[in-house]
Amino acid sequence: MKLIRNLYFGPNFYRITGLLIGLWIVAYPLPFLLFPVQIISLLYAVVLLWEIVYLFRRQANIEAQREVSDRLSNGDANPVQIKLLSLYNSPVKIEVLDEIPAQFQLRNHSFKATIQPLEELTWDYHLRPVKRGPYEFGKLRIYVSFLSHSIQRALVHDLSRTVKTYPSYLDLRRYELMAFSDQLRLQGQKRVRQIAVSKEFEKIDKYVEGDDYRRINWKATARTGDLMVNHYRDERSQNILMAIDKGRAMKMPFGGMSLLDYAINASLMISNVALKKGDRAGMVSVQDKVQGQVLPESRASQMMRIMEALYAEKTAYKETDMRALYRWCSYSLKERSLIMLYSNFESLHALKRQLPYLKLINRSHRLLLIFFLNEEVEDISMKEANSLQEVYRKALAEDFVLEKRRIAHALQREGIQTLLTRPEDLNIKALNKYLEIKQRGLI
C-alpha cells in the first residue's frame, strides 16, 4: 500500500506509452511489424519493473534537511538552504518541491537536478516576507526517477516548522556602522562631524574636511605642526521615542509592504542606533487609542523588548486620534524627549484636524513628524507628457506632490521638525535626521 501511495508516473511514461500505442495501431494492418512491437513493449515493461525494484529498495533513500533562520527579517531577502544526500548507488534524477509558507503564494517552487551516488547537493534560494507574523514551512517532497524516468518515487520529509517574521533586523549592524563612521558622507547622504552644541569635551583630533574652523585648537596645532580641532560629544541619556500611527492612512502598500511595516522597520533600526549611542529608546503605537508601548529605557534587554512589541503590533486601520497620543505623552513622559512620529497625511485638511494636538506635543517635547511621498505619483509628475491624457495625469500628480510640500511647510511654520520621504528611503533619511537633531542639540 505504501508503494502504491509513493509511486507516480512521470511525463516520459505517457510519452512512451503513447508512442507504443501508435506502433500497435500501425502494426495491426502490417503483420510483419507485430513481433518487433511486441519485443519493444516487453522490453519497456521489463524496464518499468526494474525501475520500480531499484527505486523502492529498502536501503535506497535521499536524505534531506532545510536550513532556515529561527526568525525571518521583514522586507529583506532571507536565505534558505536545502541539503540533499543520495544513498542510491547510481545517478538518479530528482525534482524537489519545497512547501514554503502560504503567504508567498508560490505553488511551483521546485528544483530539478541529477545527483550522483553519495553526492551532497545544495539548493539555495531567498524569501522576502512583506508582513510580520508566523510563517509555516511544510514538508519537503522529492521525486526520484531512474533510467527511462517513467516511474517516480515520492520521498516525503516532514520538515514542518513555524518561523516568526520580525521587523527588519538584518541591516541593523550596517546602519549602526554608518551612524558611527563616515560611510554615509562617502555615499553623499549626510554631512558628518557637525559639532554638537553640548560642551562635553571628547578629544583633540586632526582637522578633516567638514570640521568647524572655530573649534581649532591653536596650542595643539603649534605643538604638533598639524591643524588640530576640539571635538565635543553629543549629549547622552536622552529619551528617543518611536511613535507609530496605525491608522488607515498607513495601510497604503509600496513594494508589497504597507507604510506601517516600513515605519516599524525604521523604528527598530533607529532604536538600535539610539541605544548604542547611549540614549534611552522606547516605542508607542496609536490608533483611536494608545496601544503597544515600551517606555524609554537603556537597560540591556531594551532592544529585545522593543523588537517583541513591534512584532506583536496589529491594527484595524481605524481613524487616528492624536489627542490620545498627547494625553499619553503628558502622563508617561516625565522628561523632554525626541518623539519620532511616523504618520501620513494626504491633504492639508487631514493635517488641520490633528495639528492642535501635534503643537501641544511639540511644546513639551521635540516632535519629528515623518510622512511619506507617493513614489508612483511622484514618478508620474516627473515624467515627460507626450499626449493630452498624459498632460492631465502629470498635472494631477504635480498637484498631489505640491500638497505634500504644503503640509511640510505648514508643520515647519509651527516649529515642528518634518521629514518627507519615499518609503524605500525611509531608513537612511530617518537615521540622518536623528543624527542631525542630536548634533544640533535640538532635543
Image (tube, rainbow, N blue to C red):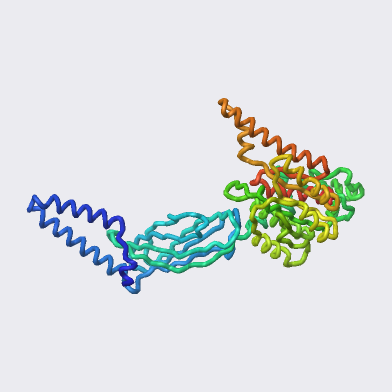
Q: Is 378 left, or right, of 351 in this rendering?
A: left
Lateral position of residue 78 relative to residue 291, left or right: left
What is the number of callouts on the image?
0
Residue that sits furthest to the left in the current view: 31
Is 99 above or below relative to 421?
A: below
Indicate the quadrant where residue 418 lies.
top right
Q: Residue furthest bottom?
A: 58
Q: Residue at x 31, y 72 (%)?
A: 1
Percent x, y of residue 170:
63, 57
Outermost residue to the right? 219
Q: Position of residue 221 (x, y in %)?
A: 88, 47
Residue found at x 83% / y 54%: 234
Q: In this rendered view, identify the residue nearer to me: 429 or 341.
A: 341
Please state the horizontal and vertical placement of residue 169, each as a whole percent of the image: 64, 58
Image-based side of 149 in relation to 291, left or right = left
Closer-to-camera residue (7/348): 348
Residue 388's place in the image compared with 4, above or below, is above
Residue, x 87% and y 52% (percent of image)?
A: 198
* In the image, residue 101 above or below residue 1: above
Q: Position of residue 232 (x, y in %)?
A: 86, 53
Residue 205 appears anywhere in the view: no
- Location of residue 189 by image quarter: top right
Q: Residue at left 78%, top 52%?
A: 323
Residue 427 visible in the shown view: yes
Quadrant of the rendered image containing residue 17: bottom left
